[in-house]
Amino acid sequence: MAQNFRRYQARNIGTSASTMFTSNSYDTVIGINVANVTTSSINISCYVTTGGNDYYVAKDVPVPVGSAIQLLDGGAKMVVESGDALKIVSDTATSADAWVSTVDDIST
């Protein structure tokens, strides 16, 4: 079976959660990178909304000035199901850029 790699990005994420993607099948998240684009430290949170509930991948993680954080590192992966939404939010307005990499439709 062919692998369908996908990428999703968002610029200037702020205090309202940015939905990076909503799964339409069984997908695997293979990378989440969030960069601080401001001149002061920020805190970011990343979570998956499923069935009306939020499940945090990371909560209030500090990202220093000029830095980025890789939320899935060391080969970690995360499986999501159809309807699950991956979201990222910052404690500061227009302060973060994010890049999410996935493998789409891993199971038929």
Image (cartoon, grey):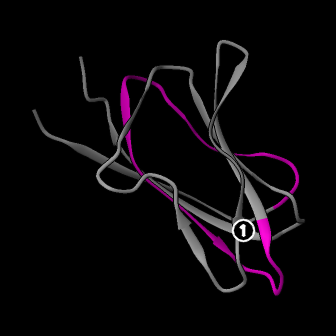
The magenta region covers: 14-42
Instruction: Please report the residue visible at 29 percent of the width from the left and 51 percent of the height from the top.
Output: 75
In this rendering, would 6 be left or right of 38?
A: left
In the foreground, 68 or 88: 68
Question: Which residue carries the number 1 mark?
Answer: 96
Give the image location of residue 26, x and y in percent: 37, 23
Q: Helix, strand or loop at disc 1?
A: strand
Report how many numbered discs are placed on residues in the image.
1
Please tell me how crowded label 1 is: few (under 14), some (14-19), or many (20+) other residues with Cα within 10 Å.
Answer: many
- Quadrant in the picture for residue 41: bottom right
Q: Which quadrant: the C terminus?
A: top left
Instruction: Please report the residue visible at 88 percent of the width from the left and 54 percent of the height from the top.
Output: 15
In the foreground, 22 or 93: 93
In this rendering, would 2 be left or right of 45?
A: left
**Is residue 56 in the magenta section?**
no
Give the image location of residue 104, x and y in percent: 34, 37
